[in-house]
Amino acid sequence: MRNKFAFILPFLLLLLVTNSLYAEDGYRLWLRYDQLNDAARLKDYRKAISGILVDGDSPTLLAAEKELKMGLDGLLGKAVPLTEKLTRKGAIVAGTPESSPLIRSLNINDKLQEVGEEGYLILSTTINGKKVTAIAANTAVGVLYGSFHFLRLLQTTQDISRLSISSSPKTEHRVLNHWDNLDRTVERGYAGFSLWDWHKLPDYIDQRYIDYARANASIGINGTVLTNVNANALVLTEEYLIKVKALADAFRPYGLKVYLTARFSAPIEIGGLKTADPVDPQVQQWWKDKASEIYSHIPDFGGFLVKADSEGQPGPHNYKRTHAEGANMLADAVAPHKGIVMWRAFVYSHEAPDDRAKQAYNEFKPLDGKFRDNVLVQVKNGAIDFQPREPFHPLFGAMPETPLMMEFQITQEYLGQGTHLAYLAPMWEEVLDADTYAKGKGSTVAKVVDGSLDNHSLSAMAGVANIGTDRNWTGHQFGQANWYAFGRLAWNPYLSSEEIAEEWIKMTFSNKEEVVSAIKTMMLNSHEAVVNYMTPLGLHHIMGWSHHYGPGAWIKDKHRADWTSVYYHKADENGVGFDRTKTGSNAVAQYFPPVEEEFSNPEKTPEKYLLWFHHLPWDYKVESGRTLWDELALRYQSGVDTVRQMQRTWDALEGKVDPERFRHVKTFLEIQEKDAEWWRDATLLYFQTFSKRPLPEGVEKPTKSLDYFMKLDPKFVPGI
Amino acid sequence: MRNKFAFILPFLLLLLVTNSLYAEDGYRLWLRYDQLNDAARLKDYRKAISGILVDGDSPTLLAAEKELKMGLDGLLGKAVPLTEKLTRKGAIVAGTPESSPLIRSLNINDKLQEVGEEGYLILSTTINGKKVTAIAANTAVGVLYGSFHFLRLLQTTQDISRLSISSSPKTEHRVLNHWDNLDRTVERGYAGFSLWDWHKLPDYIDQRYIDYARANASIGINGTVLTNVNANALVLTEEYLIKVKALADAFRPYGLKVYLTARFSAPIEIGGLKTADPVDPQVQQWWKDKASEIYSHIPDFGGFLVKADSEGQPGPHNYKRTHAEGANMLADAVAPHKGIVMWRAFVYSHEAPDDRAKQAYNEFKPLDGKFRDNVLVQVKNGAIDFQPREPFHPLFGAMPETPLMMEFQITQEYLGQGTHLAYLAPMWEEVLDADTYAKGKGSTVAKVVDGSLDNHSLSAMAGVANIGTDRNWTGHQFGQANWYAFGRLAWNPYLSSEEIAEEWIKMTFSNKEEVVSAIKTMMLNSHEAVVNYMTPLGLHHIMGWSHHYGPGAWIKDKHRADWTSVYYHKADENGVGFDRTKTGSNAVAQYFPPVEEEFSNPEKTPEKYLLWFHHLPWDYKVESGRTLWDELALRYQSGVDTVRQMQRTWDALEGKVDPERFRHVKTFLEIQEKDAEWWRDATLLYFQTFSKRPLPEGVEKPTKSLDYFMKLDPKFVPGI
């Protein structure tokens, strides 16, 4: 025995040494498979798990097998053998009834029926008298999803002795939207540059493509739109399609389909036609041919995402056609190949003097029922543009004949960009849980999105990705939580933001209760903190010009009124806020009763939306009994205070999370504190020119002048 | 004993498992400290090295200590203790006579005198009767350089039992030029984007900044110009200077000074002046004040690099002043702070109809002796622009009163960019070894550059960096070798490209003789291969428009004649090549005799420069006895053949280098083969329209038409 160790020890010691050369840089995301440090659980797991048995050799089943092997080896700190036969108890048996005789032998077809195409079962059961854990599904990708779920159970140290799990996605298409340009810049990207190295494609397949697909599969994301909604037609040329194919091939084993953005004027730009009119037969034929060409390369191509007639993008309005006519043309092109079209409702006119918040509704509601079966209308969570907080978009519930999909923004364009810790799941939860009353009480946005309210089988959720070339993928270590949460909510919009946070923390940082609870508190308070130091009480769109970084409540006199701040806050000596009631733009009329009534009356409007719907005097009394001005000031201070609380919480975790990520987050929290103070001071100084009231007690005095803040002009802010 | 192992074993096994999760992605460059696999050497080293003793606590000495600790722990596969006292034999004692009483006790002041500021001694000696290895220097940075040298000895498995090494740099300033823009794009960058995350500076110090500094220190690079020579004045504003300071602070422990590019018109653009005339007292004062401001932030700021009156950059010519007047103004501004100015000679006029190759000489030679003492004129290796091969620049040797520094291009703008394996040291060696005959035989370019020919104490070498955000730093794994070789040649321009390759291979891939010799052959043949498939026999500047990727011998009729290909190859029915003799542009007259005579006569001109200097008939007989046309075609084929030979060599190394880097390089070699064929086919088809001769036997027939190649138009090529 001694000799054996003497032989192996130097080698093992070497690993001890060299391992420390690898930084904890966050690259592994939540797919960390380090040995569990819960000794009791570890002992149980080691006893319970003796091998991995995956029959079948589809690339997806092989991916599942590989992930189980890597995950279990790591988590258990021992080599868990791949086996071909069931020789002892404790096997993890994964497969479909078709691929695996063992799974078939379980006779679980009824149960499998219920979980559908992508769902799975995880069952503690016996086969041939031997205890096993079965991961069963109707398809290989279901097996893969189940395998990730099983690993998650171990990563979060759940009891695995009596499993009876059944899970299936509530929405059909769970899709990332990459606003990535072909030159690798990323619009509103704050994590470096685009992952897609177009120049080296199709030849060079970066390992990151595989790890990206793994990460998405682990949370059930099954689609990715590779290109920016502000689209470039070039991606639809042969030269690029073979590159897209290479990515699709790399992603396919992980159940991840690729989609592209379709530039509406592509028939002119790359097709040599004189028009892109959607009723022109030549144009229709061009798109049909283009779709066939795409599908000849990528048989499971997902379809198109389209931003049309919006912010300079061409669209059917150029030809006096409706959005439905535009979308249907594309839908007809991809329909023979089972593709879908995701048509964005984010439109507003430069010319229209009407409240921008109303325009999407006005444009799209009349088109309800006019879209093809394979069209989804993609609606942002709110009617303006991914503000720190918005009331839910009035289109939800308003188009019962049309599948509406949700567009969330994972990348933090208006929420501190790359350096602020803002866990967004609570914000998304707020929207998903909101009741539209479209069909009476309980008609939540989640039910609209998952199709259950109006019996749509087609359903989808999109998230604008926060992913880039930064080593940790998302710039901020905590940005990973938003990617994670988006995937989990797309799978199941009824999950709570708290349970998602808990999962993520355990997988990403630690299973230790004190760490989990401390980080969870930080995360759950973080979004509200950002709202408070940026846009409390329903304020919105008062950030820096164009790059949207930092405060800019004074922005005015630009070429579009509805891109300025004064358009939205309407501060004057009488008060502040956008009157969207009958006396104003009457946007409230787009909501169903009783929501309309609630939003019409400042006394009934939830305080978080107060200035979204109402222009109120500075001395208006809010719930706390304070004046609006005092409350506003104290909210800004409270945002700063919460950041400082987060800093204290984080500092107390030193030594409990690895030093690399500890320092990374600590530095970013310092930036966040500075930025929060900047927002508070600059915004309050500006509004004070109207309110002409002193800052209430408890609000720190600004150390710089308004003039100083107005002159700040950050250069080369990322993401444009 | 057994219990102890039983306790530790699971932990060690865990490392075994998790270690494999980290990819061999090339991040560690040549600073890999994995345990040596040469058992005999390892045993010797373990016996010889018992501890590390570094007295003194300057940040640079601490960096040396940390590197020794990390390196020795890893290479020896055991913990090598840091000690404070010399208690047993085998210590590595590192320090300066000031920092370390032990070093002082060696009485080596005379020897130290000889190695100067940055040099070092590595000596096997005894202190207090105990065998030690002493790493001694006059300064902390010398100790750091010596420490890296010592580690290199182990990495390359040298005998360390009787060391008596003395080393000091031949050039004073060894500088990387980053052509990095403030938006993080990199001009001619093919390894992702700029390392400098300006937006998060000064707050966030990325670990990459430290590892970048380590890598540079390990090869003796002591300066870095952070910004593009096509400059943006913004970097000289307070907002950016505090960011520059943060980088300078991070680099300082590694002896790495920062420099900036100075936009000549900065006094107008950010200073509010009406002129940037270098003789205007206000302008002079503005630069003096600006320099003081910079030095108040960065006391060891290196100085300015300037591209003026070139390719659209403003300069003294705008005010009818000379380059000397421009450079001297800046030199006067930084002189009180001991800064230097590196003034680029890469100038050529849009209007001048004269041969572009002659213009820098014509412009600068008359200014010899007119520059301040702290000005270096930075001259590219050749007179055109970093072509695959150029004869040495005629300015070398022509300005004896002025320190001329070398500008090499490490990034492969014209040498296959991010995906071609081209080891550039042989090309640099060719230039450094070239004899200018300025002061008779033996007046090599190296002697001009290191100052020894004309007794300049100020000397420098610059390399345009190939470094970016790509995980492996340089895009191509073998791009690392060029960074490495540049640093080694800047330290000592008399090293051979072969010994540098051998060092790098051993440190980067393997010490195994078969691996070293195979990779060395690939590397040493690679530059010639690229020359052959791109621009054999002295052809130059016939690549794709603007992005310079791929062949483009047909490029003509652009707004600048000297940016077209036809300007350079002058192919017609009579022949091909640029007549730079008396019957042509007479550029040869810029060389000293006998070089002038040599280059004037096609019979005497080295064949590699033939078409650089001569326009010759297609049936001109070359050395081989073949016609020029046949030779040209066979050279193109030979370039392709060498790439294929490299592929075979590499394929045979499967299993002998780690699978990740093996696959990476293999894929890139496939791209290189395709590109080499593209160059061969497209260029020969084009020249064939003039030569009207068939391809000789042994040259593969093109499978596509010239028309096809001329229509190829790669989009979004990186690096612009």
Image: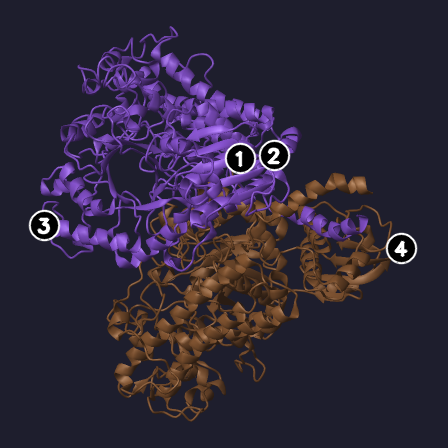
Chain colours: A brown, B purple
Tell me the element at label 3: helix
Q: Which amino acid, by three-letter code, is at mark 4?
A: Asn
Gap in angstroms between the C-alphas marked 2 and 1 = 9 Å
Q: Which amino acid, by three-letter code, is at mark 2?
A: Ala
The answer to whether A116 appears left or right of B32 in the picture is right
Quarter of the image with the C terminus of chain B is top left
Tell me the element at label 1: strand
Residue lying at 29% horizontally and 28% vertically, measured from the top left = B449
Query: What residue is pinned by disc 4?
Result: A128
- In this view, the residue farthest toward the top is B625
Q: Which amino acid, by three-letter code, is at mark 1?
A: Thr
Spot occupied by residue B36 in the image (x, y as percentages of width and height) = 62, 35
Frontmost residue, B456 versus A466: B456
Query: What residue is pinned by disc 1?
Result: B133
The answer to whether A274 appears left or right of A71 in the picture is left
Name the subunit of mark 1. Answer: B
Q: Are marks 2 and 1 in contact (CB under 8 Å)?
A: yes
Gap in angstroms between the C-alphas marked 2 and 4 = 61 Å
Residue lying at 39% horizontally and 69% vertically, measured from the top left = A674
Name the subunit of mark 4. Answer: A
Between marks 4 and 1 in the image, the one whose residue lies nearer the viewer: 1
Gap in angstroms between the C-alphas marked 3 and 1 = 56 Å
Q: Are marks 2 and 4 in contact (CB under 8 Å)?
A: no
Indicate which disc residue B48 carries: 2
Name the subunit of mark 2. Answer: B
Q: Are marks 3 and 4 in contact (CB under 8 Å)?
A: no
Indicate which disc residue B281 carries: 3
Q: Are marks 3 and 1 in contact (CB under 8 Å)?
A: no
Q: Residue B34: in sight, yes or no?
A: no
Gap in angstroms between the C-alphas marked 3 and 2 = 64 Å
